[in-house]
Amino acid sequence: MYQYNDKDQTLINERVTQFRDQTERFLKGEIPDDKFRALRLMNGLYVQTHAPLLRVAGPYGLLSSKQVRKLASIARDYDKGFCHFTTRQNIQFNWPALERVPDILEELASVQMHAIQTSGNCLRNTTSDQLAGVAIDELEDPRPYCEIIRQWTILHPEFAYLPRKFKIAVSGATLDRAATQFHDIGLHLVKNEQGEVGFKVFVGGGLGRTPVIGQVIKPFLEKQHLLSYLEAILRIYNLYGRRDNKYKARVKILVREAGLAKITQKVEAEWSLIKDQLELSAERISGMQLQFTPPEYLAEATQDTSYADNLVNHPDFATWVKHNTAEHKIAGYRAAYISLKAPDNPPGDCSDSQLDAIADLADQYSFSMVRVTHRQNLVLADVKQGDLFSLWQKLLPLKLATPNIGKATDIICCPGLDYCSLANAGSIGVAKEINETLDSMDYVHDLGDLKINISGCMNGCAHQSVGHIGILGVDKKGVEWYQVTLGGSSENDAAIGERLGPAVSKENITPVIKTLLEVYVEQRAHEDESFLATFRRVGVNPFKEKVYATD
Amino acid sequence: MQLINDKQVVQDDWSFISDDAPLNADYNIVSVARWQQHRNELSQTKNLGLRLEPDVMIEDIADDLSHFQLIQLFFPVFTDGRAFTHARLLRSRYGFTGDIRASGDFMRDQVFYLNRVGVSSFELNDQENALQVMQSMHDFSVDYQESVA
């Protein structure tokens, strides 16, 4: 894991001082609301329905156990005892007091954390694959590049006041677990014909009101040009992105309105002027790679036989291993998911005591590291197979072992009307109702891989448009209704969901989901055909007919 | 009006002259439209400055820079970040060595960034304290990007 040097630490300490001063000036009436709004957003601070919301950066989803303990203590001391993990691997506190936020930032800085640029019209936290460095399908670890990008984005003087927010994601694996094609810039580590590793660059992806799949602007970019190419894209965006309408200000609209060919031409022309000035040296890259050296795996991990025995003797453990662990590139190890989707838990929420316990488990079983996933769960990425059984036993009483990763009840959900001032409808309540309906774990497992995403408004924080089933809260004359889409995907086969039909009322949304699942089970060609595959084969009609049948 | 130039508080000698008014100051700043219309006449003027609005195409005036001692980057609204790129390009690409001045609705909390992209002087809004604005230029003692200041 990257360790801050003096410069990194100085910068975040100075940021705390700066924000403390800005907050004091605001409270004394020396900064007007609209200006303080921009300043606080660039420190992740929103004003919400009940209280401010503070979003803390989880750099590419990587946290140390020490940092997780700090999050627990902040949740206890400054909030109501819990925090929320987001789809962009960040951490949110829902109840801090505005005047205490500088103190929270100071606490965070003491463990090399910050909230810089977690909101606002600027370069946001860079996200990545939660299995980075351990995935079996990985070409190269993306995290050194993520950290290089993180540093480049922090307080970039030219790009602090962009037309709109700007998000970058990096993946180094065959399977895209980081939704890179739905980012303003998506980077895939790929190999060219000469066998060199570089980046395939996507531009103009995004979710929100106008979901768009990113397009390839550069099929192969040599590593040394990473930052100059990003800078060229950002400069073109900063100059030409629309500023007249905030709903048309993302780079996806610029690409759509100007056309990919024109934008590519502008970016390439800009890049040709700067590429030699901003080169990443081989030493800089290898120096950063050293910060992500794999932990000391034990060769004898494979010799453990208790794992195989426990799989046979404890069917519940075997079920958990099947659904909540992933293969690891080192024999004898697996990556273990910690599900934050227990039936009665608001998706992605984690209490202070759970956080403390997770930090202990990370120390004990996974080299003191925790990762945050795009689907709002956590991962202990380096667990010896012989430790999985005791890990599982400890997760059970913490309600962190629900075997539902990637399944129907592993719902992505935004805070919705319960917290968010933008929301049109509740989302946590719908997630809870769907969970109550799907109370048989066997049925959930029978449904196979299924991604249900619920957003409380069209800003789409829970990525409903790329859910296999997407649920979008809409307001109809002060009443909560829900628009359903089917067939979305944020992985390699990126797709935007198709509308099922007219919105359904709050009482009907859960029965409708139930019906959709029944249609799927009826229609699937065989037990292994996933919901998404079935939908792609049969189309929307069989679902539509059943849901809107008027008998 | 007060001004911070080269990290000192000084009196501002420059005035922006609207397009329909005569150039009656010692130090006149004109719009791009006026410059383009009356280039021959204006190029005889001593002490000429050019105001750039955010929607300017910087390459359109790049060849004319030698006529100006000062470029004024005007912020109609502090959130319009195009001027940050303009300043940067004026310094690093087009080699402008005169004064680059921030004017309009920018705020104290932006001068750190503005300074680093090459802005050298700052018109002060009435309510702002010059010493504090100068302090804000040093909000950070470290950075990750190359500065063109």
Image (spheres, coloured by chain):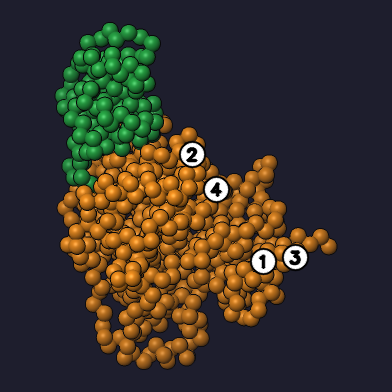
Give how far across and how far down residue A241 sits, in percent.
Answer: 43, 40
User: How many angstroms separate mark 4 from mark 1 (CA)?
Assistant: 24 Å
Label at residue A546: 3
Q: Nearer the observer, disc 1 or disc 3? A: 1
Circle number at residue A209: 4
Discs 2 and 3 carry the same chain letter? yes
> Mark 1 or mark 2: which comes first in sequence?
2
> Badge 4, how many Cα within 10 Å: few under 14, some, many 20+?
some
For label 1, the SS is loop
Residue A196 makes an appearance in the image: yes
**Do marks 1 and 2 share a subunit?**
yes
Instruction: Report the Cα–Cα distance between label 1 and label 2.
Output: 34 Å
Q: Residue at x 16, y 27 (%)?
A: B6
Front: mark 1 or 2: 1
Residue type at mark 1? Answer: Gly
* Disc 2 and disc 4 on one polypeptide chain: yes
- Indicate the position of residue A504 as horizontal and vertical percent values: 70, 54
> Which of marks 4 and 2 precedes in the sequence?
4
Question: Disc 4: which chain?
Answer: A
The amino acid beneath tag 3 is Lys
- Find disc 2 in the rendering and name its residue: A246
Callout 2: 10 Å neighbours few (<14), some, many (20+)?
A: few
Report crowding for label 1: few under 14, some 14 to 19, many 20 or more residues within 10 A (C-alpha): some
What residue does disc 1 label?
A539
Disc 2 is placed on an element classified as helix
Amino acid type of disc 4? Arg
